[in-house]
Amino acid sequence: MDRSKLYRRFRTLLVANRGEIACRVIRTARAMGLRTVAIYSEADREAMHVALADEAVLLGPARARDSYLNIERLIEAARKTGAEAVHPGYGFLSENAEFAQACYDAGLVFVGPTAGMMTAMGSKSGSKELMEKAGVPLVSGYHGEAQDEATLAKAADKIGFPVLVKASAGGGGRGMRIVRSADELAPAIVSAKREAKAAFGDDRMLIEKYVDNPRHIEVQIIGDSHGNLLSLFERECTLQRRHQKVIEEAPSPTLNAAQRETVCAAARKAAGAVNYVGAGTIEFVSDGKDVFFIEMNTRLQVEHPVTELITGVDLVEWQLRVAFGEALPLKQDEITLNGHAVEARVYAENPTKNFMPSVGRISTWRLPAETGGLRIDAGYREGDTVSPYYDAMLAKVIAWAPTRDVAIERLNRGLEESDVRGIVTNIPFLSALMTHPQVRINAIDTGFIERELAVLTAAAPAPGELELCAAVAAIVNEEQQAAQAETNSPWQTFGWQPVGRRHRSFAFRVGHGPEQKIALNYGSGPSTLVIGERELAFTIAAKDGGFDLTLDGVKSSVAAVIDRHELYLRTRNGRFDLHWVDPFGGESEEHVGEDKIAAPLPGTVVAVLAEEGAKLEKGAPILTLEVMKMEQTLRAPYAGVLKSIKCKVGDIVQEGVELALVEPAGE
């Protein structure tokens, strides 16, 4: 290959991605004086990354295969805008050798490894073969070319159950299944292949021994075109769910200094096997004693900020300088480790409903300021729409501190001060995870979240006296501000009245629970709130995002969001969603049940798993939808007979559409 086409200085960079990582790359590129080009689908016309870039090009329809995965359209977008280089981010085509080669053939600098390096190391199968030759320790497994069911079944049987079936070309937990017995293997392979094909355009599988109670350790490496190859310490990514990382930290609290040097040396050896150029990550699994190579990611990782915070290195800047053809600015012994960093991934998903993705318009977006060791990497803003077509990650909250304990405290404070409404997020779940005592003492493995799921997704506490008073205060505060916006007359100001007292009743409900009542007395003299037999004096001082509520002499900070009759409150006791019962609205406490088999979100039917007329047990799988690149299986809500299937494989269905009808047993 012509080195002048591989690495050279450029002025215009096309970012071949979306969301948080596109915003992240654009910010550093612009700080380096580069002109930036965004690409977007029809679903992302108003997206944040589009607004940040100097130029933006529409690729096509919402589906990734018609836009973000369309190599021809990406190359054409670069040609139209005069872009000389392409940064792939992570996900989509970031580890696609065909895309890297297409960029080279079009005369574009690809900010990453060459297609050859990507083929050698990006393929989980190919990289394992290389590591075997290089003497890097491996988990036993099958990573051959033959992909027929008989070969895979024979390999799994030879390895011994449990095994891990996973996509050779993928990452992020997609196309990955734990299989604990032979009869689970065939359906797991079919499902994993289908998911991998949709996410990566490649359904090849490998099978490896599943290490029970493992820890996930990975090493950040980066190489330049001058033969320099560095490791930037390790990260621990053990807190995972469905093989998707949830919390990452650096350095690993599990390794001592000697183990750290051993695993970093192994990572440099692994990358050196292909003379690697660019940023990448060598991933290992540990059984508590030994560390085994599992794969290399030939791209930037989601969790790269924790490495940046402990080393002071901007990895995106280094990626771009390597692409310029420059040598890395530091030597191995000049990279120092400073403090501890922890990152939490904020997703649009509902942990109390099996982490079902949440879509819709973000009506409120309040994340804490980047001070006191906090860093926020976001891809969304207030008013943006979360669509069902792409990964559900909204932002990352990252904290640095001199010690792990303080870093965790800072991260948790950052999560506690984050309020995102209009969609459901995993923020309360992340807070519960970071305050779990076993996490604090690092007594975890990759199965920890699944084991503790009931604790981590426990129902929010019932609103108490403080929350009921805060709910009334929130309504009064909003009404007062609306009145003051219309006129400065004291007659329009809440609580002002020359003589007499007024009484106003409120009722609130959580979910479909009973109404809880509270009264407001105001007029001449102090305003009071009455709950049962207690009457409490209160005052309100408005501020951004909420107010200070002084109740019976104690001041509390309250975050509040009101959307018509729905109230969100964050107090010292946690987060609360209340419904303000409209006394004139004729509201009924009756509600529709959740027994019908309906699409929880817009998606594509990818499998029908039961036949009409079949007798089903409660929980039996009926059909599978692909939503946000992840598969969601809809199951029978009760034992009965499947009367009808109202869709077929390939149908694109909208939220709420009934897909199947189950007649309960005994009817």
Image (cartoon, rainbow, N blue to C red):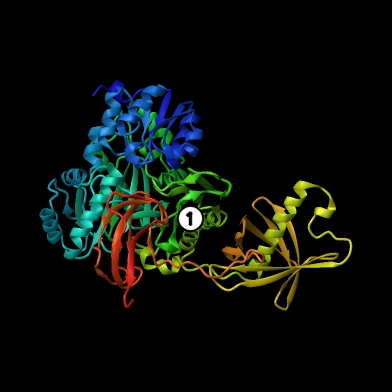
Across and down, in percent, residue 509 comes to 59, 68
Of residues 61 and 308, the one drawn nearer to the viewer in this rendering = 61
User: Which residue is at 44% across, 41% downward?
Assistant: 19
Of residues 387 and 375, the one drawn nearer to the viewer in this rendering = 387
Q: Taking the image as drawn, is residue 265 in sight?
A: no
Q: Secondary structure at mark 1?
A: loop
Across and down, in percent, residue 94 comes to 33, 38
Left or right: residue 123 versus residue 228 is left
Count the marks: how many? 1
Q: Is residue 123 above or below residue 420?
A: above
Left or right: residue 469 versus residue 256 is right
User: Which residue is at 83% across, 67% downward?
Assistant: 501
Q: Is residue 70 above or below residue 503?
A: above
Q: Quadrant of the C terminus?
A: bottom left
Residue type at mark 1: give it.
Answer: Thr
Among the 4 quarters of the image, the one containing residue 4: top left
Across and down, in percent, residue 351 comes to 44, 61
Among the 4 quarters of the image, the one containing residue 505: bottom right
Left or right: residue 373 versus residue 36 is right
Q: Which residue is mark 1?
A: 425
Q: Is residue 319 above or below residue 565?
A: above
User: Which residue is at 21% across, 59% downward?
Assistant: 187
